């Protein structure tokens, strides 16, 4: 599905706000694609020799590398700018979202009350979002995923959609839906017999993947879960505005209230890197419980794997844990989903863990996939 579509729920940015957002994208491109790529050379040519001259050995452990790099002014400058650019991104997005939030709330209420409504929204007033979500504003998103300003407030979802777009340098949520499109291609190649009657999207955020599944499988009943009420109100209204039938629920991925064997297809997109080991294992167990015979679960995420990487590369990639409020980034990079899927009850020969590229000729998204024989 092409997501360059505009829809009623997107915050209406002023020309000044758009210009500022474009500046942030350009700044982030320069910092991430340009300056960041020179860090290896800076380390080899300047930082490591200076460290060795002082300590009598080159920096080998990740903490030695971190200490040496963090003392280097060029790295300090890059790191401070990268953090500032991320903060400025949320400020720029927040300008539009918080100015336009009452219009968005009214529109969400209208879409929810419409007799033409296709899907539904079920919030649980007694639900407490897990501490892993509320304790930090993940990747610095203002107010965090569970931000809820009450009423029909949709700010969290609007921040996520617009911020996600800028975060990915303009290639994110509103352009082509890379993640779910590639997983759908993987399904077509690997499980051509699968004709899902019920689909569950776990950790759906603004529903950017839920909508493409609803459009790709019009015969299926599509459900999507997340923890934040503001996120889910937005996802529901956005799906309605895009003409997609999705049923959104406020539930935890590790403990849903759906009955056993309720789904034929369960997916999650970019969730594993934002949850703890315990929650990820719980999500796998829940996937196994919810799948009926012949069913498939596919948990997709970024191809961030620490196994086999140099200590310098691990240091570089761990920037997000320390400076971008991604507490589970390295937890995910070090995890091994195969034994966890087995422990969740999937048979050894009903598990695929690895890159999507081999199977689907796509971007190298990482998947942890389990299925149950029919
Ligand atoms: C990176 S976003 C997911 C993006 C989304 N799947 C997409 O395709 O655009 C991670 C989401 O997982 C949700 N989440 C984190 N922990 C969760 C949990 N225990 N149960 C349900 N959702 C959770 C967060 O609220 C957040 O919306």
Image: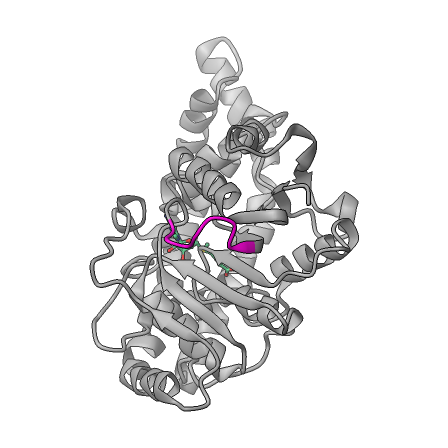
Q: Is residue 92 visible?
A: no
Q: Position of residue 178 (x, y in %)?
A: 64, 61
Magenta range is 256-263
Q: Position of residue 369 (x, y in %)?
A: 62, 42
59 is higher (above) or lower (below) than 261: above
**Foreground residue among 373 and 331:** 373
Q: Residue at x 36, y 51 (%)?
A: 252
36 is higher (above) or lower (below) than 178: above
Q: Residue at x 45, y 33 (%)?
A: 331
**Predominant secondary structure, magenta span:** loop
Q: Quadrant of the C terminus?
A: top right
User: For residue 280, which quarter of the picture?
Assistant: top left
114 is higher (above) or lower (below) than 202: below
* Residue 357 located left or right of residue 296: right
Q: Is residue 206 visible?
A: yes
Seen from this angle, which residue lies furthest top? Answer: 56
């Amino acid at each position: 599905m092409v997501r360059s579509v505009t829809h009623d729920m997107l915050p209406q940015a002023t020309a000044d706000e758009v210009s500022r957002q474009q500046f942030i994208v350009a700044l982030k491109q320069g910092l991430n694609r340009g300056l960041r790529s020179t860090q290896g050379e800076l380390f080899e040519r300047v930082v490591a020799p200076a460290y060795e001259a002082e300590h009598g050995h080159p920096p080998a452990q990740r903490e030695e590398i971190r200490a040496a790099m963090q003392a280097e002014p060029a790295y300090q400058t890059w790191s401070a700018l990268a953090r500032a650019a991320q903060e400025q991104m949320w400020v720029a997005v927040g300008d539009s979202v918080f100015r336009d939030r009452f219009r968005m709330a009214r529109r969400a209420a209208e879409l929810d009350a419409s007799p033409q409504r296709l899907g539904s929204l079920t919030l649980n007033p007694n639900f407490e979002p897990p501490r892993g979500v509320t304790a930090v504003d993940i990747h610095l998103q203002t107010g965090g995923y569970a931000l809820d300003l009450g009423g029909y407030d949709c700010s969290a979802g609007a921040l996520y959609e617009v911020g996600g777009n800028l975060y990915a340098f303009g290639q994110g949520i509103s352009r082509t839906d890379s993640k779910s499109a590639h997983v759908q291609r993987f399904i077509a190649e690997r499980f051509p017999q699968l004709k899902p009657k019920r689909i569950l999207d776990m950790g759906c955020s603004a529903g950017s993947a839920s909508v493409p599944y609803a459009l790709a499988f019009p015969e299926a009943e599509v459900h999507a879960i997340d923890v934040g009420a503001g996120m889910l109100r937005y996802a529901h209204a956005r799906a309605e505005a895009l003409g997609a039938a999705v049923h959104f629920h406020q539930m935890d991925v590790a403990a849903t209230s759906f009955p056993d064997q309720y789904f034929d297809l369960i997916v999650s997109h970019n969730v594993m890197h934002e949850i703890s080991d315990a929650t990820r294992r719980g999500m796998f167990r829940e996937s196994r419980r919810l799948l009926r015979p012949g069913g498939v679960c596919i948990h997709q995420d970024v191809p961030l794997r620490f196994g086999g990487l140099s200590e310098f590369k691990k240091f570089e990639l761990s920037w997000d844990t320390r400076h971008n409020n991604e507490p589970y980034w390295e937890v995910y990079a070090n995890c091994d989903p195969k034994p966890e899927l087995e422990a969740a009850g999937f048979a050894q020969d009903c598990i695929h863990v690895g890159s999507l590229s081999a199977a689907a000729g796509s971007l190298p998204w990482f998947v942890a996939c389990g299925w149950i024989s029919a």
